[in-house]
Image (cartoon, grey):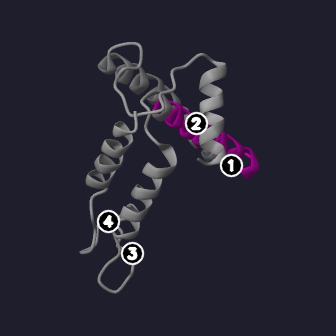
Amino acid sequence: MSEFAQDIQKFNGIYRLPVSPVPTTDVGVPAADRLKAFKDILTEEVSEIDEIITAAENGDNPLVVLTMLADLLGDIQVYCASEMAKFGLPLDEILAIIMQSNFSKLDANGNPIYDARGKVLKGPEYWKPEPRIQALLEARSKQA
């Protein structure tokens, strides 16, 4: 487990937030209610980007803009990782699977493919991460 994942578990413990050692939907409240609350809070966090856009458009000091952006993106990562801990989702292993899937998006010549916005598109060797994530969660669930 990475230091970040350990810190997330410590954070959840300090703030009396659930942490499960195995994948579960039993998080103290109905899972759908927890997910709705997560969505509301995450949406609130993401909307803070409007302040950063305004600062950038106003020509604020680039270091101030970058600091605001770093804080926002870091907060979102911490919030998402904390949610993963609540549901017993193994952060490091899941992110590793997702990154390997992302690496599979290259075209036949090993080059990235982008859309007009700069989003990375899926190449011919792309594989979906969900089956590997599901297999990981099944294996973790059996460890209980």
Q: Which dot marks residue 66?
A: 1
Q: 10 Å neighbourhood of mark 4: few (<14), some, or many (≥20)?
A: some
Disc 2 versus disc 4: nearer the observer: 2
**Marker disc for residue 78:** 2
Q: Which residues are magenta?
A: 58-83
Q: Residues within 10 Å of mark 2 (few under 14, many from 20)?
A: some
Instruction: Name which residue type carries label 1.
Output: Leu
- Quadrant where the C terminus sits is top left
Q: Which residue is mark 4?
A: 121
| Disc assigned to residue 97 | none
Q: Quadrant of residue 138?
A: top left
In the picture, measured across the screen, residue 54 lies left or right of residue 115, that is: right
Which residue position holds label 3? 112
Whichever of labels 4 and 3 marks the residue nearer the N terminus, that label is 3
Label 2: which secondary element:
helix
Residue type marked 3: Pro
Residue 62 included in the magenta stretch of the image: yes
Instruction: Tell me if label 4 and label 3 are in contact, CB under 8 Å.
Output: no
Earlier in the chain: of badge 2 and badge 1, it is: 1
Give the mark, 3 or 2, whose residue is nearer the N terminus. Answer: 2
User: Farthest residue in the bottom direction?
Assistant: 109
Of residues 139 and 111, which is closer to you in this image? 139
Give the secondary structure at mark 1: helix
- Give the Cα distance between marks 4 and 3: 8 Å
Q: CA distance from mark 2 to mark 4?
A: 26 Å
Q: Is residue 139 positioned above or below 111 on the image?
A: above
In the image, what residue type sits under mark 4? Leu
SS state under label 3: loop
Lower sequence index among marks 2 and 4: 2
Foreground tag (3 vs 2): 2
Residue beneath the point at 30% across and 20% down: 32
